[in-house]
Image (spheres, grey):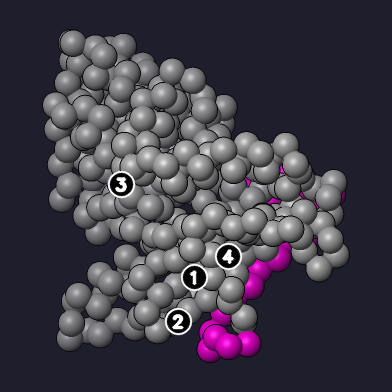
Amino acid sequence: MAETFGDFIDVSPAADSEYLNLSFSPSSVPLKQRWRNNGLSADFLGDYVTTFFPKDAADPATGQRQAEIRGAVAYIANELLENSMKYSDDSLGAPIAITLYLNRDQLLFAASNGITAEQRGLFQAFIEELEAGDPNELYLQRLEAQAMSDNGAGLGYLTMINDYGATLAWRFGEDAAGRPLVTTQVRLAI
Amino acid sequence: MSAIEGEGYRVFREAEENRVVFEGAVRLGGMAEYAPITELLSAAVEAGGTVTVDLRGLEFLNSSGIAMLSKFVIQARNREDVALCVLGAAQVPWQGKSLNNLQRLMPGLDLRIE
């Protein structure tokens, strides 16, 4: 039974004019080497969207807007991929995937990875904490708390919400092969 | 001068001016990987006086890196003999969005975004 948190939207790729999907299969490639892949993929997505926000030499604001959108996409995609890589369980065999949908008024990211029942429990506890509190307060609390310990988990999501004005949602379910999967959706108004 | 270099980035400390300079894109995988940079920043705090952190050439920093910087700001805040100055660049998108949070952690921080 799928469980959703936040305003999770069912997107069908066919209905949307433009999308880009990157998928990485669990394999024998060392984690370190794949970690590097997060930045490369995120930068690629950031560069890719600039096509849709062209610079106009006569209007300097367009250059700034293009840089802002490229930066936001690269940051969000990198955080989503880092999280997927940190928390996915390779033994489940599910790929790590990220899809970026471009619509007229928003960018939508969907990142998914295989997840164990234990990780799912921890993740849902964090989401519940996020939904119950003020993300701004929670962000500062987390920064103060991680000064004492090394637990910086969730900071990526909190920066997306607080600094980038993004809207987040999650779905815990199964993929077509019946493997447990979590999908994180991030919406950014443009 | 002590320096840390990795793929696509460089962090170095100019001891004489007690200045730490970041350049490039830093997206290391968690606190353990950030330890060498944390040590460099800690050395600047230990030296006391005014510590300047120049982020103007830092094009990208992941959330683990933001956590590392926040930890350093809290460390500096807890030292009465340390004044902290952070230099940023408005045209670097992440800095315009996230650097203000450092000042929220340490209201006395001298944040200069040019």
Q: Are marks 2 and 3 in contact (CB under 8 Å)?
A: no
Give the amino acid at mark 1. Leu
How much space separates mark 3 and mark 1, taking CA atoms? 21 Å
Mark 1: few, some, or many residues within 10 Å (few <14, many ≥20)? many
Can residue B2 be seen? no
Chain letter of disc 2 in the image: A
Q: Are marks 1 and 4 in contact (CB under 8 Å)?
A: yes
Chain letter of disc 4 in the image: A
Q: Which mark is residue A103?
A: 2
Q: Residue at x 51, y 24 (%)?
A: A150
Image spot of residue B26 (x, y percent)? 47, 44
Q: Residue at x 25, y 85 (%)?
A: A56
How much space separates mark 2 and mark 3, taking CA atoms? 26 Å
**Magenta span of residues:** A14-38
Q: Which mark is residue A108?
A: 1
How much space separates mark 4 and mark 2, taking CA atoms? 14 Å
Give the amino acid at mark 4. Ala
The secondary structure type at the circle numbered 3 is helix
